Amino acid sequence: MNTKFISFLTLFKREFNRFFKVPNNTILPHLITTLFYFLIFGIAIGSRIKEVAGVDYLLFILPGLFVQNLINGSYSNPSGSLYVSRNFGNMSDILIAPISNLSLTLAYVIAGMLRGIVLALGTVLIALFFTTFSIENYPLLLIYIFLISFAFACMGVIIGLWAKTFDQLNIFINFVVTPLTFLGGVFYTTDIVPNFLATITKFNPIFYMINGTRYAMIGVKDGNVYIGLIFLIIITIILFYTTFTLIKKGYNLRT
Amino acid sequence: MNSVIIKNLTKKYKNLLAVDNISFNIKKGEIFGLLGPNGAGKTTIINCITQLSTITNGTIKVNSYDTKENYLEARKELGLSPQELKFDHYFPIQDILIYQGGYFGIPIKESKARTYKLLKLFDLFEKRKKTPSQLSGGMLRRLSLAKSMMHNSNILILDEPTAALDVESRHLLWEYIKDLNKKGITIILTTHYIEEAENLCDTICIIQKGKIIKLEKKEKLIEDLSRNIIRVLLKDKTTLPEIIKKYNYEYKDNILQVHVNKINQTKILNTILKELDKKVINFTIEQDNLERIFRRLINEH
Ligand SMILES: Nc1ncnc2c1ncn2[C@@H]1O[C@H](COP(=O)(O)OP(=O)(O)OP(=O)(O)O)[C@@H](O)[C@H]1O
Ligand SMILES: [Mg+2]
């Protein structure tokens, strides 16, 4: 095997193994939260709501929770890992090794994507206890999964490099991702909420991610899926370029 | 042949000038000692060589690879045991070493074999399943050394390798460094134990405030700068002959002390014995050592 590929693979494996080492931090809490969403919104309250956009409410909220976990996992892995490595651990081991800037970027990003995907699949598994469904459009779903996880893994690298304190790591999740997810139509369609909320929603990038994923998963949509896709592709490219540039410059990595 | 060529290296951290336009070469196969007081810039120079720091100005070539243009090739040539002991806390130490081999492109099987060999060599095999936080300070130092040797690099940089090591481990490490060096590995070493540098190094580079104040083969440095003391015990109060008063001397309570260097030592001793002849009860020569030379140099600058 090519030595460059071994370097990449080793770092990727290290990143991937790290989150399976600490499942109590990296996997279980998210899935437990998801389980509660299904129990409360799907079963308890959902039984009153019955249908939204022509589907069972529990099924309606599934793609939103799927995307939320995909984002969380993809973001948290590189951000947490880089932050800890930079401040307490093994960053210099990696920085002195012959790993190219591109390999370094991709190892963190792809490992992050996989954590996102593991959490997203976990979401589906939990949903299968409550409901059944078949995927509407596999290729489109795969494209959405790829782009969302890729974009947020890049975001994770960026924040993981930037953060000076542990709190700053979570700022992005707590003050950006979580509000935008909840206002991104996880639990509602724009036609059943007041006008101002519908308008806010339409300007929310995460709305398009959820909307597209929902369409690909269960065939229900609340806005143009392809505009969302183009938008997502552009964001992904910008984020990747930024990530790669920061790594190349050694931003907060090399003194 | 030079292993490392440093040209006009300057490193600034914001407005702090840590390394001030220095140039020097490290020859292939030598043990090169970087000495200097705390904050002199030793670790900074090392970080510039290993690319952990970016260079403000100048160039560094490692086995002819420029650390900017051929950054990956340059890194392959180097192994580093950093001054600061920081490790990957998620994994047992055997995994840390196996990963380190992998980062340098070593296939997993080979990396495992090498890990076991080094764990045994550094007496850490029993602890292989423990994480770094479960090791003692000296064990962590040994782990750091093992880690730096995972990929069999041509150049090994050891930043204060014997800090925290007990006497036995220190001597074992010295022997091992000498063995590696005999196999042709170039070694760059920093230490605050001058005795260690005296014992190991071929070349000594003394740094202060980011500048080189002395760079010399060890023997030559000691020869040039040593100040030995000839100490003569005299029978009774004697007035010293004029010729002896010309030397750098102290005379108190029948004891005459003359400061000499390696070169003029024999001549001066002969003169003293001739001039004072019968009045001499006995004499000793106190040999200078690198530590005293080092302290004088640092204080002069
Ligand atoms: N990351 C950094 N940011 C800002 N200043 C730094 C940084 N690293 C080192 N310095 C400064 O650069 C100077 C040289 O430090 P360096 O670590 O190279 O010294 P040293 O010779 O290795 O000292 P020691 O013997 O204590 O290890 C010091 O003044 C130090 O405060
Ligand atoms: Mg230092």
Image (cartoon, helix red, strand yellow):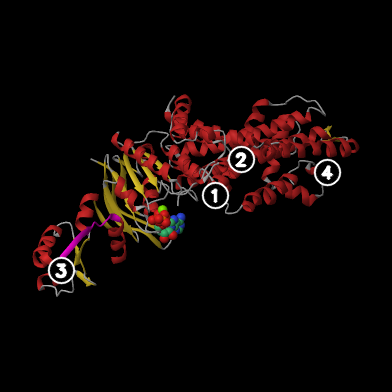
Same-subunit check for callouts 4 and 1: yes
Percent coordinates x, y for residue B178 in the rendering: 32, 39
Marks 1 and 3: which is nearer the front? 3
**Left-right relation of A177 to B174:** right
Percent coordinates x, y for residue B49 in the rendering: 36, 47
Subunit ID for the residue under disc 1: A
Q: Is residue B179 above or below residue B244?
A: above
Residue denoted by label 2: A77
Subunit ID for the residue under disc 3: B
Same-subunit check for callouts 4 and 2: yes
Residue denoted by label 1: A87
Marks 1 and 2: which is nearer the front? 1
Q: Give the number of the disc on residue A192.
A: 4
Subunit ID for the residue under disc 2: A
Q: How many residues crowd around disc 3 within 10 Å: few (fewer than 14), some, or many (20 or more)?
A: few
Residue B95 shows in this picture: no
Question: What range of the chain is rendered magenta?
Answer: B280-290
Percent coordinates x, y for residue A237 in the rendering: 55, 41
Q: Are marks 1 and 3 in contact (CB under 8 Å)?
A: no
Q: CA distance from mark 4 to mark 1?
A: 47 Å
Q: CA distance from mark 3 to mark 2?
A: 72 Å
Marks 3 and 2: which is nearer the front? 3
Identity, as a three-letter code, of the amino acid under mark 3? Tyr
Identity, as a three-letter code, of the amino acid under mark 2? Asn
